[in-house]
Amino acid sequence: GNSVTQMEGPVTLSEEAFLTINCTYTATGYPSLFWYVQYPGEGLQLLLKATKADDKGSNKGFEATYRKETTSFHLEKGSVQVSDSAVYFCALSERGQGAQKLVFGQGTRLTINP
Amino acid sequence: DTEVTQTPKHLVMGMTNKKSLKCEQHMGHRAMYWYKQKAKKPPELMFVYSYEKLSINESVPSRFSPECPNSSLLNLHLHALQPEDSALYLCASSQEGLASEQFFGPGTRLTVL
């Protein structure tokens, strides 16, 4: 079946550092790819997405490019802030029994120190 | 309105109690989801409703009973739960289509004593 693998956390960085969170996937066909973020005490919210190869999703300074050749969707940000501290989930979308199913990676907890 | 609301925010129940979780959205989404999330883990899909019909049941124990009274509401009825069912229960909704974003509610924190 389809699967998503994220880099192990937790990740701790200083403010203004460069961030990369690795995500690779295994899937039949060409799924849509997502990054969701979960702030403490909240539900998940979409950070960005890409629906086809070479698409770049971007939002709030975060970027990720859909790389078919390496089956990857790495999340990057050039200068992180304390407010970026959260858990980040990479996910792909697959069809199951007539409905969309999200397959999540394990999540990467990010802490940004001032 | 791009919000999914869930009530209650917190729930403590005994193993013999019956309780219900409620989820509501007014975005016109025809797909609605229940997830269970344990600490430091990703959400696990439980149920999917599409056009008010149950499309996916991920082999969830019968002590969890979903209900979709109309296109805006989703309930999860709980009965005879076990302590290991304690978790954050998340509701989500989306448009149809594999590229669609799922909008998540803030969740109900459930504790089973």
Image (cartoon, rainbow, N blue to C red):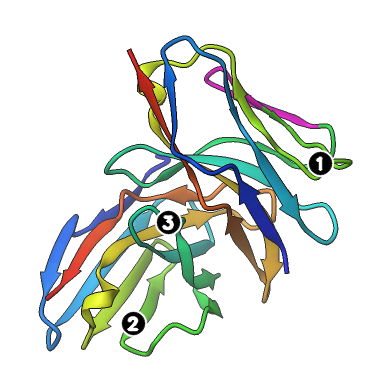
Q: Are marks 2 and 1 on the same chain?
A: no
Task: Classify B22 as above or below A104.
Answer: below
Q: Which mark is residue A52?
A: 1
Q: Secondary structure at mark 2?
A: strand
Magenta stretch contains residue A69: no
Q: Residue at x 69, y 55 (%)?
A: B98
Q: Residue at x 36, y 47 (%)?
A: A43
Q: Amino acid at mark 2?
A: Phe
Is A80 placed left or right of B112 in the picture?
A: right
The residue pinned by badge 3 equals B41
- Foreground pick, B97 / A88: A88
The image quarter containing residue A111 is top left
Is B22 placed left or right of B66 in the picture?
A: left
* Gap between marks 2 and 1 measured at Cα: 37 Å
Q: Amino acid at mark 1?
A: Lys
Q: Which mark is residue B44?
A: none
Contact between marks 2 and 3 (CB within 8 A): the answer is no
Q: Amino acid at mark 3?
A: Lys
Label 1 resides on the chain identified as A
Give residue A86's position: percent from left, percent from top.
Answer: 39, 34
- Foreground pick, B3 / B86: B86
Boundaries of the magenta span: A55-63
Task: Classify A39 as above or below B7.
Answer: above
The residue pinned by badge 2 equals B64
Q: Secondary structure at mark 1?
A: loop
Magenta stretch contains residue A62: yes
* Gap between marks 2 and 3 measured at Cα: 20 Å
Q: Where's the C terminus of chain A, which quadrant?
A: top left
* Gap between marks 3 and 1 measured at Cα: 27 Å
